[in-house]
Image (spheres, helix red, strand yellow):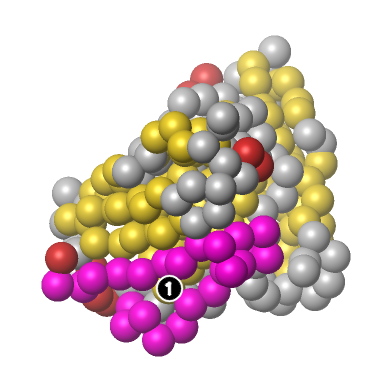
Amino acid sequence: EVQLVESGGGLVQPGRSLRLSCAASGFTFDDYAMHWVRQAPGKGLEWVSGISWNSGSIGYADSVKGRFTISRDNAKNSLYLQMNSLRAEDTALYYCAKAKSLDMTTAIMDVWGQGTTVTVSS
Amino acid sequence: DIQMTQSPSSLSASVGDRVTITCQASQDISNYLNWYQQKPGKAPKLLIYDASNLETGVPSRFSGSGSGTDFTFTISSLQPEDIATYYCQQYDNLPGSFGPGTKVDIK
């Protein structure tokens, strides 16, 4: 069964850091690009970041550029999101999603995890 | 960045009705357009990719069309299990922006 399981969310104070993880199983992880998408409470979906199969191509939303870093470890079938200088507006449910292709720019997300909640508050 | 709009923002229809949602891009995105379904408390699910391709396992009552800036998503015969919010998403240019969503419920 193809599965993505996110972890690492929690309550964090503004300005602090958090690292999200996404464990993949049931497919050949290094054959596909991966993405992070978030959803603020009661709001719509926002693409956050994407990474190609070999980490050679990476992209970020303007809202997180310079603060968030996406990475992957193909040997561990894992995707990460390092989030620094967190702000209240980063509060959201963060989803990990598998792309249909190797290429990060072909952002067709065909498998999604259940998400991990990040709350930024003092 | 490319802006995506959807209409209507919500709709109520009867079981068996044909339901149509439109999505408009702020610039030409060719056919780089996906549709997702999100049920309450659940993760999004890919239904249609590249404007008109039905994802494997998705019922054939769902369909998509369009190219350039104007796109349409259709449920040919609304079923109770289709209650959800539907989002379009472009990937012609990063960020892969989503539309604001259309909430569909049963009348």
Q: Please indicate, yes or no, whether residue A68 appears anywhere in the rendered image.
A: yes
Q: Position of residue A9 (x, y in %)?
A: 38, 39
* Residue A82 percent location from the top left of the image: 41, 59
Give the residue at x 60% y 60%.
Answer: A64
Instruction: Work out which quarter of the rendered image holds the C terminus of chain B and state it.
Output: top right
Left/right placement of residue B94 relative to residue A56 reads right
Q: Secondary structure at mark 1?
A: strand
| x, y percent for residue B90 | 66, 64
Q: Residue at x 17, y 49 (%)?
A: A1
Q: Amino acid at mark 1?
A: Ile
Q: Where are the magenta residues, as a range?
A: A53-75
Residue B78: horizontal and vertical position, in percent?
Answer: 59, 28
- Given residues A83 and B18, the one toward you in this image is A83
In the image, farthest residue toward the top: B107
Q: Is residue B39 above or below residue B53?
A: above
Q: Looking at the picture, does residue A14 appear above or below residue B89?
A: above
In front here: A75 or B72? A75
